[in-house]
Amino acid sequence: MSNLTIQPFFWRPTNLFPEKRIVSKTYEGITSYTYGEFERRVRSLLGALNDQGLGPGDRIGTFGWNHHRHFETYFAAPLSGAQLHTINVMLGDDDVVHIVEDADDEILFVDPGEPFDRIERLWDDLPIEEVVVMADSVPDTGVDAITYDELIEETDPIVDAEFPDLEEEYSAGMCYTSGTTGRPKGVEYTQKMIYAHAMMVMSPAGLNIDETDVVMPVVPMFHVNSWEFPYAATMAGATQVYPGPSPDPADLLELIECEGVTMTAGVPTVWINLLEHVDEHGSDLSSLERIVVGGSAAPEGIMRRYEDEFDVTMEHAWGMTETMSIGSVSRPKSYMDDWDRSRKYEKRKKQGLLLPGLEMRVVDDDGDEVDWDGQSVGELWVRGPSVIEEYYNRPEANEEDFEGEWLKTGDIVCVDEDGYIEIVDRTNDVIKSGGEWISSIELENALMAHNDVVEAAVVGVPHERWQERPYACVVSADDSNPSEDELLAVLDDELDQPDWWFPDEIEKVESIPKTATGKFDKKALRDQIDVVLEDD
Ligand code: ADP
């Protein structure tokens, strides 16, 4: 029996659907080619990686958005036996340097534009020797870089006989996830894990992707394998549309209309922004059948509007970097067919039913499993072939976050009688804004670096567009009253993070509620703040 690797994912569409298309928006414009052409280019890239001696045991970093060249690295890197390490372009400089050092990437594939400018700026701190710019030309720079197109055009495509033998236990993917404290943690995926998860995602109980779909993953390729679309949709032989660098609503609408996209996926903020754009400018969403929404809770009002006004079903999914993205999806079961719409929405807005292949437990503070009664809460634990059993290089986190083969997700949930998971809270003190993490502890430490700040607590409060935004409460020393500008200045000095980390509000308070053990009582603080933020 052959190994469970991604090799057959490459074989199937290139042999059975060679004429189907992949559309990609890049810095240079829109490109479209067939799976046949994709095959030729991946074989060439594979040849180039082989020539450079890259294979099993090596890591190939990428730093870019969703387009065909990045998509090709998703195949060539693991097909060579090496590991594809996708790096989040939204992270601050320090985190990017840490991640490249920690992962010990051999080579970086980087987008031109802002990602490349960053790598150039950080060049002296990065232990990288070679950069490939994912474009047809290289910016004029001091960095030793070559273009992607030159790299593959100069190499002969490798033929089947030259394909490396792959083992299912080879590390094939890697992605970092943010923690409450400390640096991002590395999560590694083997060939077998990608095989298993792509099958789960493709299946009807997963996202139900097939050859008739025209799939546009908006979720970035630097976020958990773009929720597995590049592998699941390729294996299915679906037409794929990659929307390019930081796509705005107008870009997405143009692609939906021109390419006849049937299915797309991303965080709630993307779909809120798209709806606003459609309200203002009008548009044709008639091809679109489904939007997979996840990463943060799906707002019911938005789900209803897409359904009512455009006949588009929003499917709510939950997942984590540690579960290779999608781990559950919420659709009513068949015995709910004759339920009225509101009752079905009660299910659809939950995080849903686990994908086939996974198992779960809901565990309370005493370590006991709680009932599935729609009320009892506990931490969600999951296990299965797409769930990691340890972090890369982080023994202390391994100690805390796993119990045998169970991953303790940090999500506090209740499960109803029908088996639908609902997230009610999080154990980790982090804020998720538009799909990206912000550490409240880092913000608190930075604020407390101000001489007049005695205590600072930061919590995530609901925001209509970003789902959550940081809100800071600050207690100042007697007789002092630091101004908001001073506090923002200290954040600027202390934090090496992008501007979107800064709190939307900094409130001066007399005291911060505490738990019996003297820690900040964040739940009480959130209850006390009790606002829903909107755009300024
Ligand atoms: P991703 O990149 O898929 O967002 P992360 O590992 O960064 O993965 O984040 C995982 C966490 O995001 C989950 O543990 C949960 O707290 C939150 N999350 C993911 N999906 C949802 C959802 N549908 N509803 C609410 N929270 C979610």
Image (cartoon, rainbow, N blue to C red):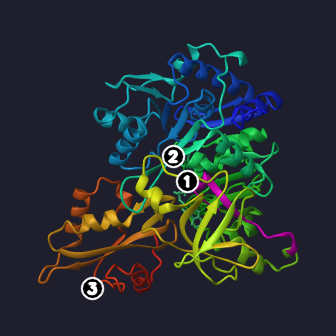
Check disc 3 and report the residue beneath it. 511
Check disc 2 and report the residue beneath it. 175
Write down the region rendered in magenta.
318-335
Tag 1 near tag 2, CB within 8 Å: yes
* Pick the front one: 305 or 417: 417
The residues bearing labels 1 and 3 have C-alpha atoms spaced at a distance of 36 Å
Under circle 2, the secondary element is strand
User: Residue 169 occupies which quadrant of the picture?
Assistant: top right
The image shows residue 462, relative to residue 398, as above or below, that is below
Earlier sequence position, callout 1 versus callout 3: 1
Residue kind at label 3, given as amino acid type: Ser
Q: Residue at x 42, y 53 (%)?
A: 395
Residue 262 appears in the figure: yes
Q: Residue at x 67, y 55 (%)?
A: 384
Earlier sequence position, callout 2 versus callout 3: 2
The residues bearing labels 1 and 2 have C-alpha atoms spaced at a distance of 7 Å
Q: Residue at x 43, y 46 (%)?
A: 393
Q: Does mark 3's beta carbon lie closer than 8 Å to ligand 1?
A: no
